[in-house]
Structure formats: C-alpha cells, structure tokens
Amino acid sequence: MEEFFKPVVASIIYSLLGFVILLLCYFIIEKITPEKSWKEIVENKNTALAIVLAAFILGISFIIGMAIHG
C-alpha cells in the first residue's frame, strides 16, 4: 500500500514547491517593476498588463513543471 501513496505524496510536495517558487518569482517581478501590477490591473482596469502578467505566470508555471517532472 505504501508504494501507491509514494507518487501521490511526491506530487503534492512538488506542487507546493512549484507554487512557492511561482509566488517568489511574482514578488521579484513586483519589486523590480515601477508600478504595483495588481493595483494597476484592479483599480485602473489595465487589460494589457493583465494579459502580460497572465503570460508570465503561465510561462513560469510551465518552466517549473518541466523542471520538476523532467
């Protein structure tokens, strides 16, 4: 039975690790850009910035996923 749970536990750990890395990357981008992206998207309804931020999140997520699962 232990052999069954080993991949499940590994997937959960890698998912949490990937999520932490993604948040870290987001906060780094937030620090190096002049404007606060979330404020700009929500308050000023900046669609272009929302699309760029979504592309960034998808790109980093893809890189993290490929690095973890090889």
Image (cartoon, rainbow, N blue to C red):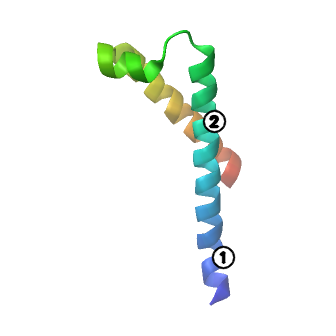
Identify which residue is drawn at 61% across, 82% down: 4
Disc 1 and disc 2 in contact, CB within 8 angstroms? no
Q: Which residue is mark 2?
A: 24
- The amino acid on which the numbered mark 2 sits, given as a three-letter code, is Leu
- The amino acid on which the numbered mark 1 sits, given as a three-letter code, is Lys
Q: Which mark is residue 19?
A: none
Q: Is residue 18 above or below residue 29?
A: below
Identify which residue is drawn at 59% across, 39% down: 22
Q: Is residue 2 above or below residue 21?
A: below
Q: Which mark is residue 6?
A: 1
Which quarter of the rendering shows the N terminus?
bottom right
Residue 38 percent across, percent down from the top left:
42, 24
SS at mark 1 in the image: helix
Please name which of the two marks, 1 or 2, marks the residue nearer to the observer. 2
In this view of the protein, can residue 17 be seen by the observer?
yes
Tell me if 37 is positioned left or right of 48 in this view: right
Identify which residue is drawn at 65% across, 66% down: 10
Residue 30 percent across, percent down from the top left:
56, 22
Identify which residue is drawn at 64% across, 57% down: 14
In this view of the protein, can residue 65 be seen by the observer?
no
Of labels 1 and 2, earlier in sequence is 1
The answer to which quarter of the image holds residue 41 is top left
State the CA–CA distance, disc 1 to disc 2. 27 Å
Residue 53 percent across, percent down from the top left:
46, 24
Tell me if 68 is positioned left or right of 11 in this view: right
- In the image shown, does 46 or 31 lie closer to the viewer? 31
Tell me if 61 is positioned left or right of 48 in this view: right
Specify few, some or many for label 1: CA neighbours under 10 Å numbering under 14, 14-19, or 20 or more: few
Specify few, some or many for label 2: CA neighbours under 10 Å numbering under 14, 14-19, or 20 or more: few
SS at mark 2 in the image: helix
The answer to which quarter of the image holds residue 28 is top right
